[in-house]
Image (tube, rainbow, N blue to C red):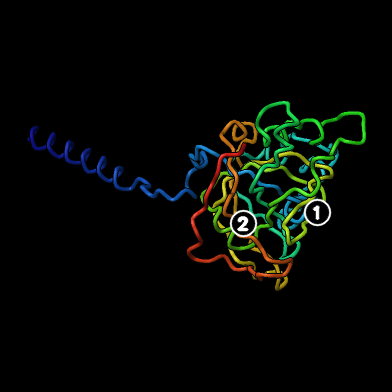
């Protein structure tokens, strides 16, 4: 009887162990990764008030949430809401066709490299360096931030291509102005700071106007940690032909694969 009882106990323990093993979540979906994606580099973007600003739906951030009390040229401090909510998933709206909220910087101007203080133009912009927003007492504080080539507004296809990527972005307090043919952007103006996040999904909006761009779900990351990754440029971001064409508001089911180049 003792041997039978022992056998039953061993069998019960094995059954519990196997049940525990097979009930574990073996899903590799990045949505379930509470620690964030394990990308070795982050995509550098620019974001303006159409996506992140105080009072903006769907989050209705407070002024303090988005550093509105600190706003100034060249501010590179993490936004308070993002710094206090690392790991949280939220949705962001991304603007409208012709008034986009997310932008890819596809190339780095040589002037950003030569102005210093380093040999990397993007890092100089993020410092910020001379004429890139540095607090210097003259009229040339932003002289290298106007008419920047290849500042590319992101519509539905470009946003869908970012799914699965980690992003590091500078947030502007107002609109980033875009000119077409040739494509250039004006990056002058006050900044709210920086944010970092993983892009989980991009979904067509059905709760706004007919020109609204997708709702993007993100997972907030530590800006200070992500800034230490290699930063990459979204080199094949789709280029709009005008402020109204293409009228690209629905993310494709199978978007093109993203191509990332090291930021110089």
> Left or right: 189 with respect to 58?
right
| Residue at point 39%, 50% (across, down) | 27
Residue picked out by circle 2: 216
Residue 1: assigned label: none
From the viewer's side, name the closer residue of 151 and 32.
151
Q: Secondary structure at mark 1?
A: loop
At horizontal 44% and vertical 51% (from top left) the residue drawn is 29
Q: Closer to the observer: label 1 or label 2?
A: 1
x and y percentages locating residue 116 in the rendered image: 73, 28
Please give the name of the residue rendered at 76% of the width and 42% of the height, measured from the top-left corner: 65
Q: Residue 222 location in percent, x, y? A: 62, 35
Asked if 25 appears above or below 72 in the picture, the reply is below
Extreme-bottom residue of the structure: 210
Give the percent coordinates (x, y) of residue 2: 9, 32
Residue at 49% across, 50% down: 31
Query: What quarter of the picture does the C terminus occupy?
Result: top right
Circle 2 Cα neighbour tier, 10 Å, few/some/many (<14 / 14–19 / ≥20): many
Q: Position of residue 84 (x, y in %)?
A: 68, 37
Q: Considering the image in quadrants, where does the N terminus appear?
A: top left
The residue carrying mark 1 is 175
Q: Callout 1: few (<14), some (14-19), or many (20+) C-alpha neighbours within 10 Å?
A: some
């Amino acid at each position: 009887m003792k041997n039978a009882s022992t056998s039953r106990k061993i069998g019960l323990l094995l059954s519990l162990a196997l049940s525990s093993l097979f009930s574990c979540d073996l899903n590799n979906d990045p949505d379930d990764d509470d620690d964030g994606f394990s990308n070795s580099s982050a995509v550098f973007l620019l974001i303006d008030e159409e996506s992140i600003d105080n009072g903006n739906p769907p989050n209705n951030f407070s002024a303090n949430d988005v550093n509105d009390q600190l706003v100034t040229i060249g501010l590179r401090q993490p936004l308070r809401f993002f710094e206090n909510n690392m790991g949280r998933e939220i949705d962001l709206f991304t603007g409208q066709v012709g008034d986009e909220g997310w932008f890819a910087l596809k190339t780095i101007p040589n002037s950003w490299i030569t102005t210093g203080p380093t040999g990397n133009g993007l890092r100089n912009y993020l410092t910020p360096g001379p004429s890139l927003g540095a607090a210097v007492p003259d009229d040339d504080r932003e002289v290298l931030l106007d008419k920047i080539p290849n500042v590319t507004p992101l519509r539905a296809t470009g946003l869908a291509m970012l799914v699965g990527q980690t992003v590091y972005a500078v947030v502007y307090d107002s609109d980033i102005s875009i000119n077409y043919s040739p494509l250039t952007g004006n990056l002058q103006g006050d900044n709210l700071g920086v944010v970092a996040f993983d892009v989980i999904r991009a979904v067509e909006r059905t709760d706004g106007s007919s020109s609204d761009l997708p709702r993007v779900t993100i997972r907030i990351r530590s800006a200070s940690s992500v800034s230490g990754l290699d930063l990459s440029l979204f080199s094949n971001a789709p280029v709009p032909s005008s402020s109204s064409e293409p009228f690209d508001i629905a993310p494709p089911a199978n978007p093109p694969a993203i191509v990332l180049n090291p930021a110089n």
